[in-house]
């Protein structure tokens, strides 16, 4: 944060930034401080001097003095353990049994563990045990399954568990997911996708959002559209992602026709949510549900007219659930779009 703030030259930090940095320092234990105390242009000790937080007790005061002196205990991270020459399989299994491996590191290293011959039951147990408190959102599991398909079922179960504690959105929700050809384009630059075939596509982002929203909605039905409207089996986790992708040929983009068909089929929906990149050959139909949203997962400007009762949300952040909940309970005079 400080590096970004000083990218055009050093200047005084705002009072609220100092306060926020100080609060962050009070939450960090020795393991986390040592893990991120790296030889950067701006070190953690520099930020500590800038923020000048007050330690909550003598133990924290001593910890910060060790940070300043550069005498923090070496953290037991997987990077340090493996770089020391320890046996990879034994190292991974020890970290899993001691539950000292972070959940994101677990997701990112599944293929490495598989190649090292780590006990599969131990890996799958860790995936399930840490999912609910992991703060890992569905697209993380989708990417992990692409790298390590042997763990697809455990990842699917963990994906569902990771969002199980979220508050439900009331009423009936009908998702309409774009599976046209343009949804196969990457979210990142072409040169990145060329070197990494698992780079997230717009369809990956749409699938992750569908999995998340399927779990937080009280009742839900999922449809896809391209050449036509198709209802998808009401599955969960990675199975829902697969059902969305294979539901029909990825061809044209007839959004208006799909919405007209859905309205004729379900005229009393409480909530309709379209997940798309906003490319449509026939435009968009007027909204008929009291809560109608258009989620744009493409990295370019919106392309559809939403003056017909739709609320546009730009971007594919899975924090959209928080925003939907806020929007539906907020004062109606507040803004109706999110970027």
Image: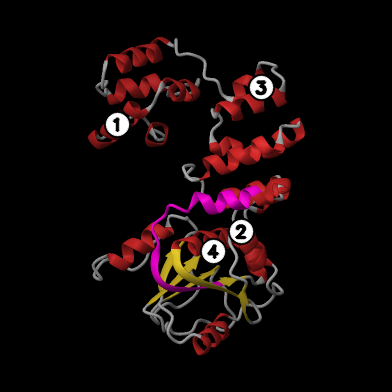
Mark sitting earlier along the chain (4/1): 1
According to the picture, the residue beneath numbered tag 2 turns out to be: 204
> In this view of the protein, can residue 98 be seen by the observer?
yes
Say if mark 1 contacts mark 3, CB within 8 Å. no
Image quadrant holding the N terminus, namely top left
According to the picture, the residue beneath numbered tag 4 turns out to be: 210
Question: In the rendered image of this protein, does residue 298 appear above or below residue 20?
Answer: below
Q: Nearer the viewer, mark 2 or mark 4?
A: 4
CA separation, marks 3 and 4? 37 Å
CA separation, marks 2 and 4? 10 Å
According to the picture, the residue beneath numbered tag 1 turns out to be: 23
- Judged left or right of residue 57, residue 131 is right
For label 1, the SS is: helix
User: Residue 82, labelled with which disc?
Assistant: 3
Say if mark 3 contacts mark 2, CB within 8 Å. no
Foreground of the two, 23 or 186? 23
Q: Residue 264 in the image: state x and y as whole percent.
A: 51, 90
Question: In the rendered image of this protein, does residue 90 appear above or below residue 165?
Answer: above
Mark sitting earlier along the chain (3/2): 3
How packed is label 2: few (under 14 Cα within 10 Å), some, or many (20 or more)? many
How packed is label 4: few (under 14 Cα within 10 Å), some, or many (20 or more)? many
Mark sitting earlier along the chain (1/3): 1
Q: Quadrant of residue 289?
A: bottom left
Mark sitting earlier along the chain (3/4): 3
């Amino acid at each position: 944060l400080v590096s970004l703030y000083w990218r055009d030259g050093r200047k005084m930090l705002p009072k609220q930034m100092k306060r926020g940095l100080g609060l962050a320092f009070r939450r960090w234990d020795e393991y986390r401080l040592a893990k991120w105390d790296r030889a950067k242009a701006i070190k953690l000790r520099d930020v500590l001097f800038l923020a000048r937080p007050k330690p909550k007790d003598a133990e924290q005061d001593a910890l910060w003095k060790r940070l300043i002196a550069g005498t923090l205990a070496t953290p037991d991270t997987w990077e340090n353990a493996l770089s020391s020459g320890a046996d990879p399989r034994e190292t991974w299994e020890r970290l899993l049994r001691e539950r000292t491996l972070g959940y994101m590191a677990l997701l990112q290293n599944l293929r490495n563990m598989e190649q090292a011959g780590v006990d599969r039951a131990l890996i799958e147990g860790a995936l399930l045990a840490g999912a609910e408190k992991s703060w890992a959102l569905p697209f993380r599991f989708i990417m992990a399954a692409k790298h390590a398909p042997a763990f697809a079922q455990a990842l699917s179960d963990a994906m569902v568990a990771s969002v199980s504690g979220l508050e439900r959105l009331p009423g009936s929700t009908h998702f309409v997911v774009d599976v046209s050809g343009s949804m196969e384009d990457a979210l990142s630059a072409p040169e990145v996708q060329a070197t990494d075939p698992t780079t997230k596509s717009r369809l990956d982002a749409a699938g992750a959002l569908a999995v998340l929203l399927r779990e937080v909605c009280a009742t839900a039905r999922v449809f896809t559209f391209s050449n036509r409207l198709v209802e998808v089996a009401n599955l969960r986790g990675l199975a829902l992602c697969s059902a969305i992708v294979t539901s029909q040929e990825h061809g044209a983009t007839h959004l208006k026709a799909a919405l007209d068909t859905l309205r004729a089929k379900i005229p009393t929906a409480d909530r309709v949510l379209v997940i798309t990149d906003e490319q449509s050959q026939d435009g968009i139909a007027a909204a008929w549900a009291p809560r109608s949203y258009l989620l744009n997962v493409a990295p370019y400007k919106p392309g559809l007219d939403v003056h017909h009762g739709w609320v546009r949300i730009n971007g594919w952040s899975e924090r959209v659930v928080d925003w939907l909940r806020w929007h539906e309970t907020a004062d109606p005079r507040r803004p109706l779009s999110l970027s």
